[in-house]
Amino acid sequence: MAFQTFDDEPNETAGAHTAPATQPAKKPNGAAANPVNPTEDFEFGDENYKSSSKLPRIKPEKGQVSRFFLVAGMKPKAKETHYIDGKGSFICLGEGCPACASGNQKRTRIVVLAVRYTNADPKTGKLGQNKPQYEVGWVLLSRANYSQMLDVLEEESTPYTVDWKLAHANRAFGYEFAVAARDAAYIKVGDQAVIAELVKEYADGEDLSKKLGKRSNAMELRTAMTNGGGLDESTLADLADLDN
Ligand SMILES: [Zn+2]
C-alpha cells in the first residue's frame, strides 16, 4: 500500500505556468528553474537536476515526537484550500471556485518555517547533553493546532523563543503541540548564526508559500477533481487534523 501523505503532491509543477513569465528563476535547484540544456549532457553536481523537495514537512510518525523551533522573523502563511486526493492541495479560487461549487470543503491551511532538531529523542523530544543538529523544514497547522500553540505558551514566551514538541498520538488521528523547553536549545548553545545561515535561502518565503497549495485556474481545478482518487488512512488522518 502506498502511504500517500497530505503533502505528497504528485503534480509538483501543476499550475506552474500561472506564475508570471517574467519571474526570474533565481534558484538553481528549484522546480521553477527549468534548465536550458541544448546538449543534454551535464556534469554530476549540477544543482539543476536535484529533487526540488528539499524542504521537508516536520511530521512525526505515529507514537513519535518531533522537536523544532520556529524561525524568528519568518511569518506564518495561510490560505483557504481544497484537498483533492492524489492531486494535493489547491488554493481556493474564491468567487466562482469549482471546488466550492462541487461541495469540496474549504480548509484553512497554515504553514510556517521551522527547524527540527534531528538528534532529539523520537519518543520524548529530549536532547540531553547532545549538541543540537538541525534540519530546516515546515510545519502544517490547522486553525486548532494554531490555537493550541498560542494556548500552551507561557506569558513571557513567544512562539519564537521556545522549543516545540509535535506529537503524533498512537491512534489514527491527531497531532498535539506542546512546549518542549521554555528556552530554545539553539539559543542556549549560541547557534543563532548557524541558524541564520541555514535558513537564509528560505528568507524570501517562496518555498514556504508553495506548501500552501497549488495555484491553478478553474479549468485545472476541474480536471484535478475529475481525475482524483479515493482517500487512504494517512490522508484521512491529516484531513481530520485540519478539521479540528
Ligand atoms: Zn473554493
Image (cartoon, helix red, strand yellow):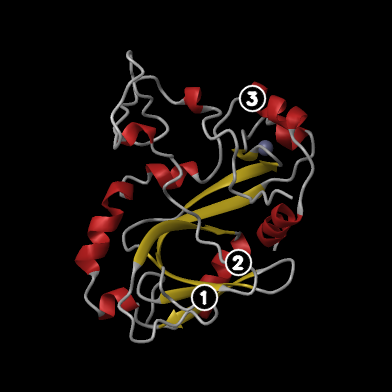
In the rendered structure, which amino acid carries the disc numbered 1?
Pro
Give the crowd class for mark 2: few <14, some 14-19, many >=20 residues within 10 Å.
Answer: few
Residue that label 2 marks: 61
Q: Quadrant of residue 30?
A: top left
Residue that label 1 marks: 122
User: Is residue 93 at least partly visible in the picture?
Assistant: yes
Give the crowd class for mark 3: few <14, some 14-19, many >=20 residues within 10 Å.
Answer: some
Q: Which secondary structure, mark 2?
A: loop
Q: Judge from the rendering whether residue 177 lies leftward or rightward of residue 113; answer left or right.
A: right
Q: Which secondary structure, mark 3?
A: helix
Label 3 or label 2, whichever comes before in sequence order: 2
Label 1 or label 2, whichever comes before in sequence order: 2
Contact between labelled residues 2 and 3, with CB atoms less than 8 Å apart: no
Label 1 or label 3, whichever comes before in sequence order: 1
Along the line of sight, the residue nearer the viewer: 241 or 194: 194
Residue that label 3 marks: 220
In the rendered structure, which amino acid carries the disc numbered 3?
Glu
Residue 54 in picture, x, y percent from top left: 42, 47
* Label 1 CB-ligand 1 distance < 8 A: no
Give residue 185's mark.
Answer: none
In the rendered structure, which amino acid carries the disc numbered 2?
Glu
Of badges 3 and 2, nearer the viewer stands 2
Residue 41 in picture, x, y percent from top left: 33, 21
Q: CA distance from mark 1 to mark 3?
A: 40 Å
Contact between labelled residues 2 and 1, with CB atoms less than 8 Å apart: yes
Q: Judge from the rendering whether residue 107 lies leftward or rightward of residue 159; answer left or right.
A: right
Ligand 1 is found in which quarter of the picture? top right
State whether residue 106 is above or below residue 44: below
- Quadrant occupied by the C terminus: bottom right
State whether residue 220 is above or below residue 125: above
Q: CA distance from mark 1 to mark 2?
A: 9 Å
